[in-house]
Amino acid sequence: MALSIAIMGNEPVSEVGVEKKELKETTIIDSDLLAIDFCGEAIPLSELRIAERYQKMIRNYDNPTFRKLMTKTQKRIKIIEPILKKYGVPADFKYLPLIESAMNDDAKSHRGAGGYWQLMPATAKSLGLVVNETRDDRKHLVKSTHAAGKYLRNLYRQLGSWTLVAAAYNAGPTHIQNKLDAQNKDDYFKLRLNSETTRYIYKLLAVKEWFNNPERSKEWVSGDVVDRLAEFKVEQKKADVQLAKQIEKPLTDS
């Protein structure tokens, strides 16, 4: 299905007597290229800044190392998905261990987060995992995924949006809640966040898309989608200027 993006002016007020005009259709973008979501929440890829960020990330994962990781982790991803489902967590989160630990049970951050899901020791223990000198359940795929499922479910109950849940997984729920309150926003894509958390959802999207829609991902890598979207924005701005002049003229003539 093709999404035809037509440049149209808004209907002007009748008092100035300006005729509404439909301008020529200038840009056509296949709607499937923009129909990307995270856990059923639409990604506003018609916004140029978001499309550019997504394109950059999809390109970052277009490399032999990641393709090898995709092949290597297929079996573990199949183990993760049904466990998350038990907790009402959407399947898109099954890719989170790839960006957190490259699906490496021995991965550990400088802050102490560890295992497949990179859980902090205190968080892991609060979710029922054993973390001590002789045992670390964060390295057990099934046990740690149960813990992650509980944690993600709790975040959703607090925040009410899966994209915000992803942000909170990266930056912490208190930090994200403070940002929501301070900025009076409830949309991940409208929040001003640090660069790492801003990129986080795009990482998840890129991994998900390479697994599920490699051909669509290649289209984004080519740059053609963003180029066409940028052209549309230029034409849209010209149309808005033209419409403003049409509205202004009757006022100055009167």
Image (spheres, rainbow, N blue to C red):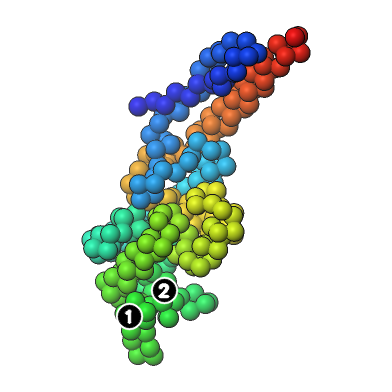
Residue 9 x %, y %? 57, 20
Q: Nearer the viewer, residue 24 or 251?
A: 251
In-image side of 46 versus 243 (left or right): left
Identify which residue, 114 or 165, lies in the foreground: 165
The type of residue carrying mark 2 is Leu
Left or right: where does residue 42 sit relative to residue 10?
left
Whole-percent x and y of residue 242?
Answer: 66, 18
87 sits left or right of 231 in the view: left
Q: Residue at x 52, y 48 (%)?
A: 189
> Mark 1: which secondary structure?
loop
- Given residues 93 and 211, the one toward you in this image is 93
SS assignment at label 2: loop
Q: Quadrant of the C terminus?
A: top right
Q: Position of residue 172 (x, y in %)?
A: 49, 67
Q: Mark 2 and 1 residues: CB-CB less than 8 Å, in contact?
A: yes
> Which residue is at 57% across, 42% downward?
49
- Bin the neighbour count of mark 2 within 10 Å (Cα to Cα): few under 14, some 14-19, many 20 and up: many
Q: Using the rendered view, name the quadrant where residue 154 is placed.
A: bottom left
Q: Is residue 146 above or below residue 205?
A: below
Neighbor class of circle 1 (other Cα within 10 Å; few <14, some 14-19, many 20+) is many
Q: Position of residue 244 (x, y in %)?
A: 67, 20
Q: Which mark is residue 119?
A: 2
Question: For residue 8, which quarter of the picture?
Answer: top right
For this rendering, which residue is in front, 28 or 222? 28
